Amino acid sequence: MVQDNPNKVIIVLRKSENNVKISSDSQECLISGILVLTDRQVLVVDQSNNIVKLLDQQNQVVSHCSMTKWPVDICQITSREVAVTRNDSNIHEVQFITVNNRQIVTGRKLQLLHTCYGIAFHQGDLYITSWTALYKYKLNGKLVSKMYEDTSGDYTVMRCAVSPTGDKLYITNLLQHKLLTLARDGSVLATFTDPALQYPRGVHVTPAGQLLVCGGKYSDPFILQVDSEGKRKLATLGTEKNCMPQSVCYNRHTASIIVGLHEKNNTMVFKVQ
């Protein structure tokens, strides 16, 4: 991809599916978070089975780690350390895990006072959503600020992503069908709506700065590319009936887009250019 052009339109060449179910899964998979590590391995958060799974370069599950409490989203901290948001009725936390020799090792936790849903990281700052607000934290758990809040309804601040330069943050508003672009100080730079943008969930920024968002209903799912200003749709990358995209991630090693689905044992993989 052209690193200097965040608005270069992504073209889908072909689509395939990849099975991420393991024998111990008691439920159909719900892949709510995806992360590609620097060594080309892939981590997926299987929310319905409360597991983080490690996939090798051939997309086979080679290791997994039980999270016990409703894991949701994932972001990379260092080349080997990642952070996962977790919730239940009483616990809201960020669990740090490390990948060593194809094994997942749990580490420290940050206990927070609000729901921990979406998560992103940039240059020492953790961005965490609570369904109605976006917070900025330091890695030691110190709250920097409540950057943005919208209490006009439920699920107004679902997932978040940060641009490669850190000057823009993107958040999805599920029930009001919006994608918001925020400045560093939390002010709203743009609000994107589109007939195709129904129930947006996952949001992701590629290393080149290209903005991807996914969601929809079972009858009308979508994966869209939006311009880096968050103002207009550049491309519809994929739709497939009878699925509900939950998460999206670009794999620069394989030039592909991975999409996690609700109650499906496969992820969708789009080979792109």
Image (cartoon, rainbow, N blue to C red):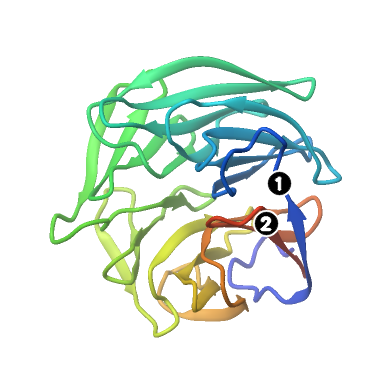
* Furthest-right residue in this view: 58
SS at badge 2: strand
Task: Say which of 229 and 28 sits in front.
Answer: 28
Q: Nearer the viewer, residue 120 or 123?
A: 120
Residue topped by disc 1: 20
Residue 74 image label:
none
User: Label 2: which residue?
Assistant: 267
In which quarter of the view is residue 24 placed?
top right
**Which quadrant holds residue 209?**
bottom right
Q: Amino acid at mark 2?
A: Thr
When the figure is inspected, residue 39 is found, relative to residue 155, above or below; the finding is: above
* Residue at image point 28% right, 43% down: 130
Instruction: Give whichever of 84, 122 is nearer the camera.
Output: 84
Q: Are marks 2 and 1 in contact (CB under 8 Å)?
A: yes
Left or right: residue 228 versus residue 255 is left
Name the kind of residue labelled 1 in the image: Val
The percent coordinates of residue 252 (x first, y second) are 74, 53
Query: Residue 73's x, y, as percent?
Result: 48, 42
Q: Residue 146 at x, y = what percent?
A: 22, 40
Q: Residue furthest top?
A: 108
13 over 136 or under it: above or below = below
- Determine the residue positioned at 75% across, 60% down: 256
